[in-house]
Each structure stands twice: as C-alpha cells, then as structure tokens.
C-alpha cells in the first residue's frame, strides 16, 4: 500500500501534524468536523488522478486514508466518504457531471459523500431500497429517507441510488442544498460524531438528468464496488498499526507484566503484515475482484477489533478513561465493523 507515494510521504505527515493532530480531541469530544484538513489534502494534490493508472490512484489514496486513521479514524472515515464519491465521478459516462465536479473534487474545492449503504444492502439482499425515483420532464422526482450520510456540508455533494421500477434503478450525485431535501444532524453516537453525519429526507426532490451518473445503477455499482470497499481497508489498518504502537509503548509497565497477556504486539503485527501481503497480491492481479477485496476488508475488521481490545488490556485503567486514546480506538473500531459492508453483510456475501 505504500509504494506509490514515497515522494509525498513527508507532505502527508506534515499535513496530519499541522492540520489534523491539533483537533483530534475536539473531533471526538465536541463533534468537530475536520473539513479544513480534508480540503488541504486536495489542495496538496493528493487526490489528483493525472498521469496515474487506476491501481496507482487507489494505492496512493489508500495510503493517505491509513496515515489519517492512525491519528483519527473519524476523519479518515470522512476521507473515505470523499474518495467513494470521487470514485463515482471518475467512473461516470456523464461528461457534463465529470467536467463540473472531477477537478473540484480532486483539488478539494468541493467535498463529496455517499449514501450507498442502503443500496449496497439492497444488492446483497438485506434490505429494500429506501429511495424511489419517478421520471418527469428533464429528470426524476425522488422520495424517501437515507438514515445516515456523513461528510455533508454547505457546498458538498453526495451519491445516491433510487428505484425507478422493478427493473430500473438510477444513480445520481446531488448537492446538499435542494428544494424538498431535509438534513437532520446526528451526533449522539458512541463515536464518529465529528463525521458531519445527517439523516436525509427526500420529499419530492427534483433531480435533473445532468446529475444522473448512470441510468443503470445495477451495472454502475459493479464498476465502483471494488474501490468502494478497498478504500475502507486502510481505516482498519491505520487503527491497528497505531494500536500496536500504543501496546509497545506500555510494555514495561508494572515490571513488564503485560508480557503475560495472551495477545502480544508481534501477533498483531504478523496478522497485519499478512493482510498487507494480500493487498499486494490483489493489486498485482489483472483486475480487482470485489469478493477478494471484501475478504480482505472482513479480515481487517476482525483484526482491528482484536487490536483495539488488546490495546485496552495492555493499557489498563489509563485506557478506561473516557477520552483516552485506547477507548476512543475501541469505539471507532466498532463503527468500522458496522460500516456498510458490515461484518455480518460481508460474512453473508462471502458465504452465499
Ligand atoms: C455514524 C454513522 C455514520 C454513517 N455514515 C453513513 C454514510 O455516510 N453513508 C451511508 O450510506 N451510510 C452511513 N451509515 C450507515 C452504515 O454504513 C451502516 O449501514 C449502519 O452502521 C448500519 O448497518 P446495519 O446493517 O447494522 O443496519 P441497522 O443499523 O440494523 O439498520 C438497518 C436499517 O434501518 C434503518 N435505520 C437504522 N438506523 C436508523 C435510524 N436511526 N433512523 C431511521 N432509520 C434507521 C436504515 O434503513 C438501516 O439501513 C452510517 C452509520 C453511522 C452509525
């Protein structure tokens, strides 16, 4: 995951130190949304796809997600939201939309989000589709509710899928300010409250054809699904790596008593290394098979849960403080396990 961005590493590190680390407590304790940091990543050219292959783009951006997640998984999740939306724009055949949003998304001028949890669950046979679209002159009228969409703000756009008929679903990208669209902020979660998350209610919202990414969402989802899932893997790897570092920091505590705990950092390290090798093998294959990506995503979710739990045990009561780094990682890791595709969703698609 690290090979493509060697020359940009110091810049990424500097941005994280200057623009993110000072706000890390505020993000968790006061639901502060680190929009400035996300924009700075874009301004620094870290989302630029110019002269890069699809795989290079993915690997480079996954690296930025991982480095961010080491310090703040909430913000890394917001970054994932943006990268998922950016993937939609990169893959659309709608030239007008691409012209309008691609460079703005890549240079951080406009941030993106994604309301695709419910559609992903729909395609896996878990849920009915929550949004419906009625054709009208020049576009569609959309109704329904998306329970949670994160990384939203004044000037942000987000992706959605709505059902037109039994056999047709459309995918669009829309701005947050729209007639008939009501956004209700959600901040009462166990963690991730600095993710600028809103419930989005659509009441006869007109979506013009120009914003439709694909008239065949079923096919379009096949195209974007590998990247959608791949960008999530570094969320867990970042949290795992920082948990390993935290475990090693306290190894001398109480005369080295932690050495008697059943899980040690070298075991976590070996598992993390194995996942990194699987990612490399995956990226060396001709195309990304989404089920292989999903398998790595699932293994990463379990490893992350193991790493944050081990970190809690090694840190003892210091980690049990409400705003301690280990307890925060624990709360964030449970979100990673319950982010679509959730662990149960992944277990299902990898079994049936
Ligand atoms: C903090 C946070 C941020 C999220 N951000 C996004 C995002 O950016 N984009 C996105 O598409 N999804 C988002 N989700 C959803 C997430 O990806 C998972 O789908 C979600 O965590 C639940 O998965 P689940 O399968 O356990 O479903 P459950 O929690 O069991 O929910 C099943 C269904 O019930 C409905 N539902 C759940 N909670 C509520 C509620 N409070 N009010 C009304 N209906 C509800 C929804 O239709 C949901 O799909 C977010 C969730 C959380 C907690």
Image (spheres, rainbow, N blue to C red):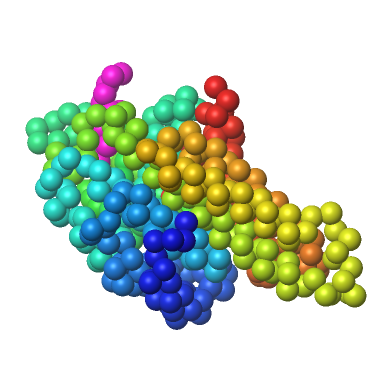
Residue extending farthest top: 166
Q: Residue at x 62, y 53 (%)?
A: 272
Residue 28 can be seen, yes or no: yes
Q: Residue at x 20, y 55 (%)?
A: 101
Q: Looking at the image, how many numbered discs can be counted on the residues?
A: 0
The C terminus sits in image quarter: top right
* Prevailing secondary structure of the magenta residues: strand
Name the one closer to the observer, 283 or 171: 283
Name the one closer to the observer, 67 or 161: 67
Q: Position of residue 4 (x, y in %)?
A: 39, 61
Which quadrant of the view contains residue 147? Answer: top left
What is the magenta range?
163-172
Name the one closer to the observer, 125 or 284: 284
Which quadrant of the view contains residue 154? Answer: bottom left
User: Height in image: 183 above or below 172?
Assistant: below
Q: Position of residue 196 (x, y in %)?
A: 43, 60
User: Height in image: 167 above or below 190?
Assistant: above
Based on the picture, tell me whether residue 144 belongs to the magenta stretch: no
Decide if residue 149 is on the left or right side of residue 273.
Answer: left
Decide if residue 153 is on the left or right side of residue 318.
Answer: left
């Amino acid at each position: 995951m690290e090979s493509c961005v060697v020359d940009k590493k110091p810049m990424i590190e500097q941005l994280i130190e200057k623009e993110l680390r000072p706000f890390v407590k505020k993000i968790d304790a006061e639901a502060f949304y680190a929009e400035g940091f996300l924009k700075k990543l874009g301004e620094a050219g870290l989302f630029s796809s110019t002269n890069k292959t699809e795989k290079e783009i993915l690997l480079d951006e996954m690296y930025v997600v991982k480095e961010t997640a080491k310090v703040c998984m909430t913000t890394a999740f917001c970054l994932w939201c943006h990268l998922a939306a950016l993937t939609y724009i990169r893959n659309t055949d709608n030239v007008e939309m691409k012209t309008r949003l691609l460079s703005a998304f890549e240079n951080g001028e406009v941030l993106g989000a994604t309301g695709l949890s419910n559609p992903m669950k729909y395609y896996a046979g878990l849920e009915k589709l929550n949004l419906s679209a009625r054709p009208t002159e020049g576009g569609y009228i959309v109704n329904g509710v998306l329970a949670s969409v994160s990384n939203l703000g004044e000037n942000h756009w987000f992706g959605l899928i709505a059902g037109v008929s039994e056999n047709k679903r459309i995918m669009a990208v829309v701005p947050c300010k729209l007639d008939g669209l009501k956004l209700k902020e959600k901040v009462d979660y166990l963690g991730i409250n600095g993710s600028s998350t809103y419930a989005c209610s659509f009441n006869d919202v007109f979506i013009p054809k120009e914003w439709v990414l694909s008239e065949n969402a079923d096919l379009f989802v096949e195209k974007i699904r590998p990247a959608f899932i791949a960008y999530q893997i570094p969320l867990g790897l970042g949290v795992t790596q920082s948990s390993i570092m935290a475990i090693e920091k306290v190894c001398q505590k109480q005369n080295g008593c932690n050495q008697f705990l059943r899980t040690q950092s070298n075991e976590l390290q070996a598992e993390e290394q194995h996942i990194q090798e699987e990612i490399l093998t995956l990226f060396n294959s001709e195309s990304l098979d989404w089920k292989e990506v999903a398998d790595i995503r699932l293994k990463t979710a379990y490893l992350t849960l193991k790493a944050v739990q081990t970190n809690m045990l090694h840190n003892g009561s210091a980690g049990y403080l409400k705003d301690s780094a280990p307890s925060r990682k624990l709360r964030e890791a449970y979100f990673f396990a319950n982010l679509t595709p959730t662990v149960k969703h992944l277990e299902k698609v990898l079994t049936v």
